[in-house]
Amino acid sequence: MRRTTANRRTVLRAAGLGVTLPFLESLQSRARAATTSETRPVRMACLFFANGAIMDKWRPTGDGAEFQFGPTLEPLAEVRDQLLVLEGLTQHHARANGDGPGDHARNAGAFLTGAQPKKTSGADIRVGQSIDQAVAERIGHQTRLPSIELGIDRGRNAGSCDSGYACSYSSNISWKTPTTPCLKESNPRAAFERLFGSPQQAADMQRRIRNRRSILDFVGEDSRRLQPALSGADRQKLDEYFTSVRDVERRVERAAEQPLQIPELQLPDGIPAELTEHINLMFDILLLAFQTDSTRVATMMLADAGSNRTYPEVEVRDGHHELSHHQNDAAKMEKIARIDRYLVERLARFLGRLKAIDEGGRSLLDNSMILYGSAISDGNRHNHDDLPILLAGGGGGTLKTGRYVKYEKDTPLNNLFLSMAHRMGASLDSLGDSRGLLTGLD
């Protein structure tokens, strides 16, 4: 299906909130003075792939800035200068730690939470708040949506999916609280309308804005009549209350003056039959979310943990999960490497599009942190150390990219998450087994 993306004239506004516009060429001369002093927002996305990787083909050769891609990461050559390939990171609580089998479920459950998932197939699930939601809790008020959660598989959130672990662990990487997963959206149209609405929703929203404004006018007049009958303390309380009311009113007025316009993106009615089209569409929606500053925090699962999807796109008709138990069979490992590279190609397309969007001196990729990885390294061994982790983007100029960085064995992956949170303006003291900020990034 042919796709179109938002052009530079697209203006997005949300009811009750002012949304930062994409950088517009026609406004460049007027914006130049402002952009030299204004810091553009930093965005973060955490992207998950299932079943680990063939690490011999994933790892670069060389070190530091003098590295060369292995076969799996070769498609990222065009964005090499904005990548950090990180080696030696571990997600300790994805390990059994006495809980027996179930590494795939723990892989997803622990990936962004850094917590040990409770082994249960019932409703008493518990893991921890994920890093994306910890960041959204602290900065999400700055955008229309605190975060978005996307995926390719529909997933299940009831029953057991992996050796006594609830499907909620396998199907989600984003957790609002230790017991509440943030359910992901796999339908492109539903994900798009969650971000931008539909034409009918836009009309309904404008109607609600008009009604809300008249109600606020009425409440304000009513409060003035109350003033003479109130004590000094009560007047102060009422004044504090109406200060917040006036703030809402100003936001409503801004929204009424700048009605919602929905960007152009051709979408199917359901989930695309072709995997490549599906992944590309979800990445396009994520790009629009960041470009329009509708949100600054996102997660996306390219497959649920333990996924047994086939990949005829690269002539792999065996199930991915079954192949991951390859027992060092060269033919099976070669098929997994094809899957690994195919998914990296989809990532490369997304990163290239982020790099092509100018935000007044820096690209959208410069102003983002895109983490791509898994909490399983070798799917055959089910190990959770020396993980396949990439960090793309400049973090608003705070990351020194174009490098292959090796860390000591069992360096907590959660140190990286703390460092990302700090760059988002959401300082956290700890996450899981973190031991502080990750060094060597800047």
Image: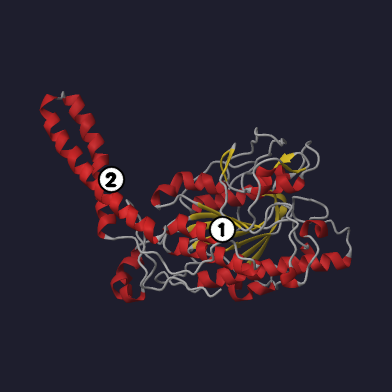
- Residue shown at 45% from the left, 45% from the top: 138
Q: In which quarter of the image is the N terminus?
A: bottom right
The percent coordinates of residue 314 (x first, y second) are: 74, 72
In the drawing, what numbered circle is on residue 156?
none
Which tag is nearer the camera, tag 1 or tag 2? 1
Which residue carries the number 1 mark? 187
Of callouts 1 and 2, which one flags the residue occurring earlier in the amino acid sequence? Answer: 1
- Residue shown at 68% from the left, 39% from the top: 117
Determine if residue 22 is in view: yes
Which residue carries the number 2 mark? 248
Q: Is mark 2 on a helix, strand or loop?
A: helix
Work out whether 392 lies above or below 120.
below
Answer yes or no: do the residues labelled 1 and 2 have beta carbons within 8 Å?
no
Work out whether 417 lies above or below 337.
above
Q: How far apart are marks 1 and 2 (CA)?
A: 33 Å
- Residue shown at 20% from the left, 26% from the top: 234
- Residue shown at 52% from the left, 72% from the top: 353
The percent coordinates of residue 391 (x first, y second) are: 60, 61
Work out whether 57 lies above or below 214.
below
**Label 2 packing within 10 angstroms: few (<14), some (14-19), many (20+):** some
**Label 1 packing within 10 angstroms: few (<14), some (14-19), many (20+):** many
Q: What element carries label 1?
A: loop
Q: In which quarter of the image is residue 236?
A: top left
Which amino acid does the dot numbered 2 rest on? Val
